[in-house]
Image (spheres, rainbow, N blue to C red):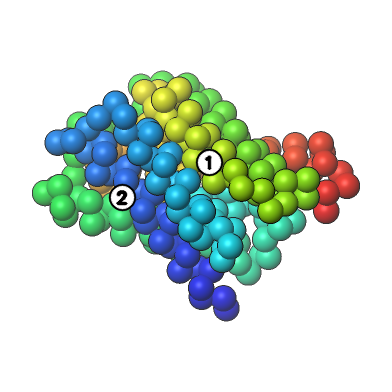
Amino acid sequence: MNIKKYITEFIGAFFLVATIGFTVMAPGADHMAPLAIGSALMVMIFAGGHISGAHYNPAVTLAVWLRGRCETKDMWQYMAWQIAGGSLAGLLVTFVKGGPASGATMFANPVNALIAEFLFTFALAYVVLNVATAKANANNSFYGLAIGFTVLTGAYAVGNISGGAFNPAVAFGISIMGLAHWGNLWAYLLAEFLAAAAAAYLFNYLNPNDK
């Protein structure tokens, strides 16, 4: 067991979800929250990329595993530690903010939410695979910025439709904080894991010689 990798994944997921909670939960809700969230992901990727690959997202881990750049034993451990980090962040933010947010409801249009989460989780996984695992971009210096800005873009684009999770660990965290209804969790997980699989399939198809 490479505990250093798993701790790194825990830390990255923790600070991503904590940033979401502290910037989105009132008081303090701000239209600039996506910038803070994307930046938090970016800096955590630069901090931990050399240790674990800096997935911080079970959907990304699935995509990297399907692409052939993550061992099966690590895939399950990564997912568990990412969800644990996101969940602990949700609990901590809820404590600091004095309780969970109120008013979260079931998706008014689950199909629209599924589409939104699928599209930008696909974009996220596709970007990760291309900038952080492709041989042509090996040892580049921009991968963290590219990945963080993908999340920022998605949050601004469809945050008002689905909440803009793009990450099962985030989905658990925002549910704990009351920013999302627990009844929506299935939609997040379904859309995000399907999107990750689609991104991995497309990457492998477009890059048949990048093994």
In-front residue for pair 187/151: 151
> Which residue in the protein does label 1 denote?
145
Quarter-of-image position of residue 23 = top left
What amino acid is found at the position of numbered circle 2 in the picture? Ala
In-front residue for pair 31/193: 31
Secondary structure beneath dot 2 equals helix
Residue name at image x 43 percent, y 56 percent:
12
* Residue 172 showing in the rendered view: no
Residue name at image x 45 percent, y 46 percent:
41
Q: Quadrant of the N terminus?
A: bottom right
Q: In the displayed structure, does residue 164 sit left or right of residue 193?
A: left
Q: In the displayed structure, does residue 103 sit left or right of residue 36?
A: left
Marks 2 and 1, the one that precedes in the sequence: 2
Whole-number angstrom distance, CA of label 2 to CA of label 1:
19 Å
Q: In the displayed structure, does residue 2 sit left or right of residue 181?
A: right
How many marks are shown on the rendered structure? Answer: 2
> Which residue in the protein does label 2 denote?
18
In-front residue for pair 48/103: 48
The vertical placement of 79 against 115, above or below, is below
Quarter-of-image position of residue 53 = bottom right
Residue name at image x 16 percent, y 54 percent:
95
In-front residue for pair 73/57: 57
Residue 183 x/y as whole percent:
35, 38
The vertical placement of 7 against 38, above or below, is below
